[in-house]
Image: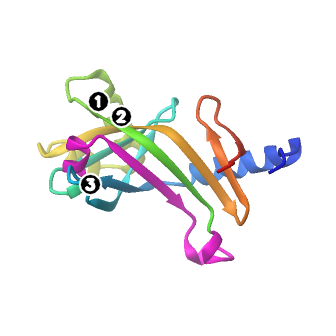
Amino acid sequence: MDEMNVEERAETLVAYRKFMASQQTLLLSTASCDGLPEASYAPFVRDDAGAFYIFVSELARHTGNLLKNPQAAVLFIRPESESQNVFARERVVFRCSVTEVGSDETLYLSQINALQQKFGDVVSILRTLTDFHLFALKPESGQYVVGFGRAYAICLDRDDLMYDIP
């Protein structure tokens, strides 16, 4: 596929950033130790380095999966009601490495506070529950799809896009 011209690159990058800024939850794909897939979702905050932080309960299967198999995929997708074609919905997918953030780490307090600021008092209740874990999901690769034939690799080190060549 040909390289994007400067104007198209700028417009697509703005659309990608605007789409990501509008998201409050991520769709989460994990796998058990036996490789069984699990789909779920979680509210998140994102840091300046691009890592996603989720605060999830041991009662959810995805938490056990993340503890035992620290990798995940996350999906952000435009709602069907806002899409012109359900076969070509705008979406972003990241493959992530996962790390649990311990409650004794400085990062834990800053990200829990960020979650509380974004989502309100419910987080102040959840943070008192001992079965909740904070995870950092660090993207290792990503793809932004805007429609048919318009897939872009996300350059994670510089928050830029380039045509995705399979």
Question: In the image, residue 16 lies at what x, y percent?
Answer: 66, 50
Q: Residue reaching furthest front?
A: 166
Residue kind at label 1, given as amino acid type: Tyr
Q: Is mark 3 on a helix, strand or loop?
A: loop
Q: How far apart are marks 2 and 1 (CA)?
A: 5 Å
Write down the residue under mark 1: 108
Q: Which amino acid, by three-letter code, is at mark 2? A: Gln
Q: Is residue 38 left or right of residue 88?
A: left
Q: Name the residue under label 3.
A: 35
**Magenta residues?**
62-88
Q: In the rendered structure, which disc, 3 or 1, sits on the residue that comes first in sequence?
A: 3
Residue designated by label 2: 111
Disc 3: CA contacts within 10 A as few (<14), some (14-19) or many (>=20): few
Tell me the SS state at disc 1.
helix
Q: Relative to 157, does residue 54 appear above or below in the rendering?
A: below
Q: Residue visible at 38% across and 55% down?
A: 28
Q: Are marks 2 and 1 in contact (CB under 8 Å)?
A: yes
Q: Residue drawn at (38%, 52%), measured in percent from left and top?
A: 43
